[in-house]
Amino acid sequence: MLCENVFTLHPMLMKIKFLHFAVAAATLLSIPTINFAQGPNLGTAANFVLFTTVGAVGNTGISHLTGNVGSNSGSTTGFGNVNGVMHNNNGATSQAAQDLLFAYNEINGTPHTFSHAPLLGNGDTLIAGVYAINGLTTLAGNLILDARGNSNAVFIFKIGAAFSTQAESKVKLINGAMACNVYWKVEGMVGMAAGTSFKGNLIVNNAAINMSTRDTLEGRALSTTGAVNITGTMAYTPVGCGSALLKGPAAPNLATTACYAIFSGNGSVANAGVSHATGDIGSNVGLTTGFDPLLVKGQIHPIPDGSTSACAADLLNVYSYLNTLTDDIELLYPAQFGHNLVLTPHTYVMKSATSFTDTLYLNGQGNPDAVFVIKITGALGTSTNAKVILTNGTQAKNVFWKVDGAISISDNSEMKGTFIANNAAIDLKTGVIIDGRALTTNGALSTAAVTVTVPAGTCGTLMPLTWMHFRGNNVQENVLLEWGITNEVNNGFFKIEKSRDGKQFETLATIDAETGKTQANYSFTDLHPFILNYYRISQTDNDGRKSYSATIQVKRNMNKSQKPVINVQAGYIYVQTAASTAGKGSLELYSIEGRKVSSQKIVLTKEVSLYKIEKPAQTGTYLLQILNNGVKMYAGKVMVF
């Protein structure tokens, strides 16, 4: 009976308990639909990084913003290039104003789960929840928000008065916390001191927002009524929480242009200095000159051919595609392009000549397939040492520049992407590095000690064939040539080329490649070497692309019984010989009847040297004599064709 009395409730107590349960249930049902797995719905206001329903939005100095900027009843002034759309008193701002008011009311009506003193930071760590803070509130030092491994954890701060931050104060997110899930509802003015690093969405009611130099905001600064002013600030809308993954436009189909590093559809392509390239080089109308084949991993097209014709046609298609893309964002100040501007995957347009100074960041926001297109109506010029830096997954193969004007990239600049000039010249100055391409539909293209590399994976035929060695040795009176290569995946054949002077080469032999081998060794014997020989090997892929070995020099073994090497071609009789004693001599040519036809003074040395005498106009057999200090050292017949 005692135990029964202990565990049995009086009927009146049971009735009271039921009433308490009913009240609690009713209270729970009356709470707005906001929980710790999903924050309040900002609607279209989420598109804005800076916004006020009523008031001006202003900037001083160079600020870097990602997201739209606008006012529904006021002006926006002092801004440079913004990675977003500038809106003033239009349909977009009207809808954003309505959505912002709804989000404010939603947060305002949410019961708090914690109360907190009006001093935040100083190394404190807070967990997810709704925090009520009364009175003037200050952030000092570091405030750490800990999601405890839950990336959906929501943090809401309801501040009942003005809110300020001290210099160099920081909001830090750990263990999965995300800026998009942090909300600050403030009933008063917000002032951030210099160097503040802030995270989350500021929703300020009937008051202004002021941000200072070196402040960083990952979130949004939104006011129902009040001015928004920034000075030398970086602010960007956060990713995650259901926000769309930025992809940019679809990339163009480069077709045959993918394998060209440097190209003009109509104009000369000329290089000065030591330039390196990975990819083809050429012009479809004009000569390509000055490039060293040993420094080009790809095919140099000295004159137009079938490949350049196809590239010219495909380049026009690529240009046309980029030209017709609808732009998402207009960068309003082309003369201020660069200056540490950060862009995200979009189609951008600048409607006049553009001056690129300092650094441009292209932020892929974690998407390696994100595409950037920058369209310029006018010329593009850069400062010296200008740089494009790719961050958060951006790849050079997905960056495209369409320029309706000349392109001039100044000394030591480092560019990323495919640059296409339309009906204008391209000038790449000393030390320029491009991870991409330099292409013009119609115009001269000049380079000076540059490095241009087609992005990896965009031209499947650029196989990494490597020359291990190439050497030549005398074997009795012959020359044995030996070479070895690695990564011979796409190789078609070799051509062994031979020259007397190291400048004008002729094909000596063609040898098929042993395609598919990781490593291969080859040899060839020249049975008729000159006294002094220059050799090189051209390697041609199955698709016609070509690369060259180094040029080597081999001097044939000589003995007293060996005769000079004589060759008749191109208007001259060429003689390779050496003398046992150096001296003044001459080449003398006689007809078969003994009449002197011509003579040429020479200086003989102990080293093998190349001499020449003019070839007679009439074909036939002639007698050639070599005199050294008046003494005949050789006489023999020569046939003139």
Image (cartoon, grey):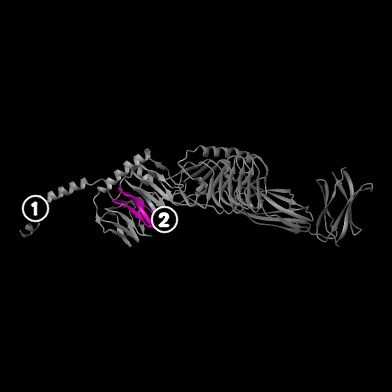
Mark 2 Cα within 10 Å, few/some/many (few <14, many 20+)?
Answer: some
- Horizontal side of residue 308 vs 616, given as left or right: left
Q: Nearer the viewer, residue 474 or 148?
A: 148
Quadrant in the rendering for residue 146? bottom left
Q: Is residue 47 magenta?
A: no
Determine which of the numbered discs, if any, sits on residue 213 in the image. Answer: 2
Q: Is residue 363 visible?
A: no
Q: Earlier in the sequence, mark 2 or mark 1?
A: 1
Q: Nearer the viewer, residue 146 or 266?
A: 266
Residue positioned most to the left = 1
- Horizontal side of residue 293 vs 345, given as left or right: right
Image location of residue 438, percent across then percent down: 58, 46
Image location of residue 77, percent across then percent down: 42, 46
Q: Is residue 188 magenta?
A: yes
- In the rendered structure, which amino acid carries the disc numbered 1? Leu
- Where disc 1 sits, the SS reads helix
- Where disc 2 sits, the SS reads loop
- Horizontal side of residue 424 vs 146, given as left or right: right
- Horizontal side of residue 450 vs 96, given as left or right: right
Determine which of the numbered discs, if any, sits on residue 70 in the image. Answer: none
Image location of residue 431, percent across then percent down: 60, 54
Number of numbered discs: 2
Q: Is residue 555 visible?
A: yes
The residue to which callout 1 is attached is: 13
Q: Which residues are drawn in magenta?
A: 185-211
Dividing the image into 4 quarters, which one contains the N terminus? bottom left
Q: Nearer the viewer, residue 464 or 329?
A: 329
Dividing the image into 4 quarters, which one contains the C terminus? top right
Image location of residue 150, percent across then percent down: 33, 54
Q: Nearer the viewer, residue 233 or 315?
A: 233
- In the rendered structure, which amino acid carries the disc numbered 2? Thr
